[in-house]
Image (cartoon, helix red, strand yellow):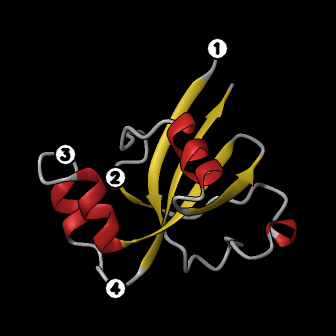
């Protein structure tokens, strides 16, 4: 059975390699999850949305791991993307608006 996940990750995570995924540790190349704080929850972004954003050139993004893709996106852009009615709006609003994060979406199974 396939399962899906999405979250906002820490671009500055020392175990994560945005610029050179080939140098990532063998266990995968995914950044530490920041939002949502609960690891078993997700922000509701689909893999197809992330891939569309990458393919259209709308946002800087790439494949991060076998089944995960990510968008490099600023804190302010995240707040605009998710809006004030999103379930995690308060967590997203608490992010540094001047800093970049990774919006991760993936699948496994």
Q: Residue furthest top?
A: 1
The quarter in which the N terminus is drawn is top right
Q: Earlier in the sequence, mark 4 or mark 2?
A: 2
Which numbered disc, 1 or 2, marks the residue that appears first in the sequence?
1
What is the distance, in whole Å, between disc 2 and disc 3 at their CAs?
Answer: 12 Å
Residue 31: image quadrant is bottom right
Between 54 and 20, the residue placed more toward the observer is 54
Q: Secondary structure at mark 2?
A: loop
Which mark identifies residue 98? 4
Going from N to C along the chain, the mark reached first, 1 or 4, is: 1
Front tag of 2 and 3: 3
Q: To which residue does mark 3 refer?
A: 86
- Measure the C-alpha gap from mark 1 to mark 4: 39 Å
Q: Is residue 67 positioned above or below 34 on the image?
A: above
Closest to the camera, between mark 4 and mark 2, is 4
Q: Quadrant of residue 35?
A: bottom left
The secondary element bearing badge 4 is classed as loop
Q: Quadrant of the C terminus?
A: top right
The location of residue 37, given as percent across then percent down, is 33, 55
Element class at badge 1: loop
What residue did someone put label 2 on? 36
Q: Residue at x 64, y 58 (%)?
A: 30
In whole angstroms, how far apart are the C-alphas of marks 4 and 3?
20 Å
Of labels 1 and 3, earlier in sequence is: 1
How far, Cα to Cα, is label 4 from label 2?
Answer: 19 Å
Above-or-below relation of 80 to 88 = below
Give residue 95's quadrant in the image.
bottom left
Q: CA distance from mark 1 to mark 3?
A: 28 Å
Crowding at dot 1, Cα within 10 Å, few <14 / some 14-19 / many 20+, comes out as few
Q: Which residue is mark 1?
A: 1
Q: Nearer the viewer, residue 34 or 92?
A: 92
């Amino acid at each position: 059975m396939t399962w899906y996940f999405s979250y906002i990750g820490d671009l500055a995570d020392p175990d994560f390699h945005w610029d050179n995924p080939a140098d990532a540790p063998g266990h995968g190349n995914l950044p530490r999850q920041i939002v949502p704080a609960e690891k078993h929850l997700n922000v509701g972004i689909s893999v197809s949305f992330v891939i569309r954003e990458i393919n259209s050139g709308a946002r800087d993004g790439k494949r991060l791991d076998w089944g995960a893709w990510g968008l490099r996106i600023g804190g302010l852009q995240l707040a605009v993307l998710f809006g004030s009615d999103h379930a995690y709006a308060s967590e997203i609003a608490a992010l540094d608006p001047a800093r970049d994060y990774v919006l991760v979406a993936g699948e496994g199974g």
